[in-house]
Structures are given as structure tokens and as C-alpha cells.
Amino acid sequence: MAESMTETAKGRVVFLIRVPQDRTAAFLDAYQRIRYQVAEGVDGHLVDQVCASPTDPEQWLITSEWVSLGHFEAWERSPEHRKLVGPMRACMTEAKSIRFEVREQTSARRS
């Protein structure tokens, strides 16, 4: 059972990044320019979020959810990926990527 769960498990990708304050506007502008191209045009993409630290103006978090990690990895290897995210990456001084398979998900029970 664990094997089939892994094959069909959603993927979550987490990027912990640093963007100097003087590059924040360019970073957010680059995200705005590509967000719907990714959301509406990349196979397997479900949702992403860009989050700012409330205590460190240079610390950012990008999370994305995928049908599977395989979908993300295919997108990441594509030339289109490098072209689209290049302007965002140019604003970063550090980036760490971590990948996870979603094993459980809980939301409020509805009656």
C-alpha cells in the first residue's frame, strides 16, 4: 500500500530564500509576471504561495503544491522553467529547496 500511496502522493515544494530589501519590488514584479502562466499552464501545478517573514524583511518562503513530485521535477528540468523564473532568481542571494510528499491532510469536518 505504501508504494501506491507514494506514486499518487501530492508533492509539496518549499523554497526558503533571501531577497535584499532593495530587490523586493523587482522580485514581486517578476512573480506577478509569471504567476498565472505557471498556475494555468504548467501540467500538475496545483497552487503556490509567496510568503514574507514578519520579522526579517529579507526572508521569504515560496511553497507550491503539485499533483506529484514527478510533475514538479519535469517542470524544473524544462527550458521554460529556467526562462520564466530567471528574473525571480536574479533577485535572490540565497535559496534552499526542499521537497516533500503529502502523506496526510486535515481540514475541518463538515456536517
Image (tube, helix red, strand yellow):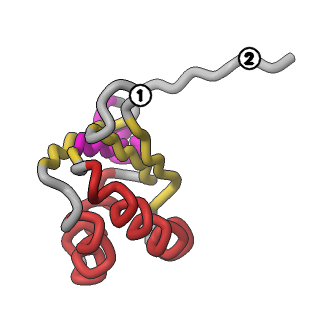
Pick the residue in front: 56 or 62. 56
**Is residue 41 in view?**
yes
Mark 1: few/some/many CA within 10 Å (<14, 14-19, 20+): few
Reply above or below: 102 against 7: above
**Quick one: quadrant of the C terminus?**
top right
Residue at the image point whose x is 19% and y is 45% from the top: 97
**Quick one: quadrant of the N terminus?**
top left
The part of the image, by quadrant, that contains residue 91 is: bottom left
Residue 68 appears at what percent x and percent y?
Answer: 37, 52
How far, Cα to Cα, is label 2 from label 1? 31 Å
* Badge count: 2
Q: Work out which residue is located at the far front of the displayed protein and give it.
A: 22
Q: Work out which residue is located at the far right of the displayed protein and give it.
A: 111
**Lower sequence index among marks 2 and 1:** 1
Three-letter code, disc 1: Pro
Q: Which residue is mark 1?
A: 54
Residue at the image point whose x is 35% and y is 25% from the top: 55
Q: Which region is colored magenta?
A: 2-17
Element marked by disc 1:
loop
Q: Which residue is mark 2?
A: 109
Residue at the image point whose x is 24% and y is 73% from the top: 86
Is 36 left or right of 102, judged from the image as shown? right
Pick the residue in front: 64 or 61. 61
Reply above or below: 43 against 102: below
